[in-house]
Image: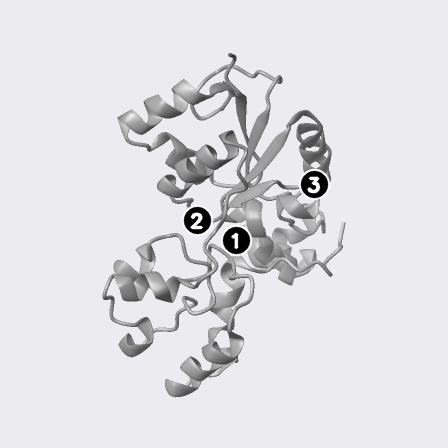
Amino acid sequence: MSKPKVAFFDFTSCEGCQLEVLNQEPQDMIDLLNAVEIVNFREAISDKGQDYDIAFIEGSISRPADETRIKKIRRQAKILVALGACACTGGVNAMKNKYSAADYKSYVYKDKAHYERLDTYAVRPVSAVVKVDCEIPGCPINRFEFLRIVKSVLMGVTPQLPEYPVCVECKMKDNVCMYQRGETCMGPVTRAGCDAICTSYGDPCTGCRGFVSHPNINAQKDVLAKHGLSPEDVMLNFTMFNNFSKEDTRR
C-alpha cells in the first residue's frame, strides 16, 4: 500500500514552524517518515514534487501572486493544513492591515519613501482565500500537537483543538498569574495547546494561537478591572497576532 504523499509550502513567514516539524525526536521523525512520503519540503529536501495528497501551508497570503499559488495548491491537495499563526490568523504580518501604505513607507523609508512602490494588499490567513481542512496554530507550532494532528489526518479523523484558554494550562503548571506579576496577558481568551510555554518562562501570552471559539470576554474584563486595567490597556497584546478582519478587503 502506497504512503500518502505530503508537501510543505511556505508563503510570508519566517519558516520557524517548518523548523519545528524537523525538530522532532529521532524516533518520532522515523515514525513520521514511515507513515508518509514527503515529496516537497524546501527546508529539508531538494525535491520539488507536485504530486501530493496532503499540503501543509506555512505563512500568510500577502500578495496577489500568493492567491494564485495557494489556489493551485488547493486544487491539487486532497487535504490542506494551515501551519502556524501566519497561516491560521495572518500572524504578525497582518499588522500591516492597520496602516496605510503611506504610513509604513514613511516609517521605514523616511525621506526616501517616494522611491518605494508598495502595494496595499491586505494580509490574509490561508482560510480567507481557500478552504482549509484543519489548522495547527501557534508561533511557532507545538511539535507534539503537530504529530497528534498528523496522526488524526492519516486516520481520517477530524483533529480537535482545545476549546479552553491558556489559563487552564497555566494553572495546571502552578504558574503565578501574570496579572499578579504586574503584566497584561491574553491567556484568558487565547486557545490552549501550547502547554503555557510563554507564561511558564516568565513572558505574558500574546495570543499567537488565536482566540478560543467562544472567549469569555466578560471574564477577561473582570480580570482587567481587578488589576486596575481597561480593554484599551491590552489592545497592543490583542493586535500582535490577531489583526485580520473579514471586513478588510483591500487588494
Q: Nearer the viewer, residue 105 or 114?
A: 105
**175, above or below 25, in the image:** below
User: Is any part of residue 202 visible from this angle?
Assistant: no
**Residue 81: which quarter of the image?**
top right
- Name the kind of residue labelled 3 in the image: Val
In primary-sequence order, the first of circles 2 and 1 is: 1
In primary-sequence order, the first of circles 1 and 3 is: 1
Q: Which residue is mark 2?
A: 139
Gap in Å between the C-alphas at discs 1 and 3? Answer: 20 Å
Q: Which residue is mark 1?
A: 92
Left or right? Give the position of 247 relative to 164. Answer: right
Gap in Å between the C-alphas at discs 2 and 1? Answer: 10 Å
Disc 1 residue crowd, few under 14, some 14–19, many 20+, Cα 10 Å: many
**Residue 201: which quarter of the image?**
bottom left
Instruction: Identify the residue shown where x is 71% and y is 49%.
Output: 121
Q: Which residue is mark 3?
A: 130
- Name the kind of residue labelled 2 in the image: Cys
Instruction: Identify the residue shown where x is 75% and y is 55%.
Output: 249
**52, above or below 57, in the image:** above
